[in-house]
Amino acid sequence: MVNKIILIGRLTADVDMKFTQSGKKIGKFNLAVDKGKKDSDGKREADFFPCQLWQENAERAEQYLHKGTLAYVEGRIESREYTTQDGQKRKVWEVQVGTFRALNSKKDNNGGQESAPPQEASWGPEQFDQAAQAAEMSDEVPF
């Protein structure tokens, strides 16, 4: 069986770092992935994927990924169930990130960020495929 997901999208906020009760670091962020279509008002539609990273991977993400960063994310989908304080059962699906790469950032050079990317509209399905292939085939060690 295979459980693998590859996404390219933009972070909706900076990585949120927390610690589990046992002291393990966990980083969380939401990745907005363009659906490639517009709604009835002409606005671009996106899916939002909750992502998690652990320990050193979380530290690296906090260092390199920020709100607006275009990121390549590879991992697996995991579900978990929990009960809210008022007794309702909930099920969530999250991406457990194994590998990621910051492709670029919307931020300017302040704080060492990369310069702004080309217009986001130029990122159609072909460009997403090319970026994913380039990230997969790179000899660089993933963050």
Image (cartoon, rainbow, N blue to C red):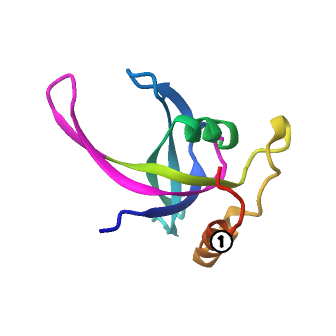
For mark 1, does the 10 Å Cα neighbourhood hold few (<14), some (14 to 19), or many (20 or more) residues? Answer: few
Q: Position of residue 76 (x, y in %)?
A: 41, 56
Residue 83 falls in image quadrant: top left
Disc 1 secondary structure class:
helix
Q: Residue at x 69, y 42 (%)?
A: 64
Q: Tell me the kind of residue under disc 1.
A: Met
Judge whether residue 75 is colored magenta: yes
Front residue of 24 and 11: 24
Judge whether residue 110 is colored magenta: no
Main SS, magenta residues: strand
Residue 82 falls in image quadrant: top left
- Please give the residue where the numbered disc 1 appears in the rendered image: 137
Drawn side of residue 92 relative to residue 69, left or right:
left
| Quarter the N terminus occupies | bottom left
Q: Position of residue 53 (x, y in %)?
A: 50, 42
In the rendered view, would you say 11 is above or below 21? below
Q: Position of residue 139 (x, y in %)?
A: 71, 66
